[in-house]
Amino acid sequence: MGLFRTLINPQHEEHPERAEVARAANLLQIGEFQLLQLAYKDWFGADLPTAEIDSVFGSYMIQNQVPVWARHYARHIIGLDAAGMLNDSDPAFHRYDPEYKTIVPYGVRRFCGAAAVILIFLGGGIWLSHLTTAQTSQILPPYFSDETMKNVNQGPNPTP
């Protein structure tokens, strides 16, 4: 019944300590495992060792044992949100998220260079098309030149 209830309402958690961790992870828009990694880094000052990953996450997910450092970190995040000081897009919260990237603009010089290349390309194309077209008497196709239209207006040459 607990699995069905959680599927219908993902915010629902039967264990209050895990609910705090899940809420903090949702506030930061990251997974619970990433929150555990951040909490470990915050508490111990080092990344979670690979030898301990399975035991920490297994005890958290299967046995519902929330480490003290994870509870402390989750409460800190929830407190920051309550105070209105939480910035969920801070790169420090997404250091274990490989898809998270911050886009830094390259500046005005690069933009001006790209705009100049586009302007030269388009302007050169318009100038080149102007040079290659002949004088026409019509705007729409078929494009007959003025010379062809003069010959048509004069009619056929009479044979003597």
Image (tube, grey):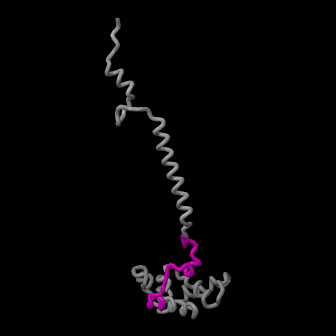
Viewer-closest of 108 and 29: 108
Taking the spot 33% from the left edge, 10% from the top edge, the residue there is 158
* Quarter of the figure that contains the C terminus: top left
Is residue 97 placed above or below 139 in the rendered structure?
below
Residue 144 visible in the snapshot: yes
In which quarter of the view is residue 40 placed?
bottom right
* Quarter of the figure that contains the N terminus: bottom left
Taking the spot 49% from the left edge, 81% from the top edge, the residue there is 88
**Magenta stretch, residue numbers:** 78-103
Viewer-closest of 151 and 47: 151
Is residue 84 placed above or below 104 in the rendered structure?
below
Could you say where residue 69 lies in the image, as x and y percent from the top left? 58, 92
Taking the spot 64% from the left edge, 90% from the top edge, the residue there is 44
Could you say where residue 125 lies in the image, as x and y percent from the top left? 49, 44
Question: Residue 80 lies in magenta, yes or no?
Answer: yes
Taking the spot 61% from the left edge, 86% from the top edge, the residue there is 56
Viewer-closest of 81 and 107: 107
Q: Main secondary structure of the magenta part?
A: loop
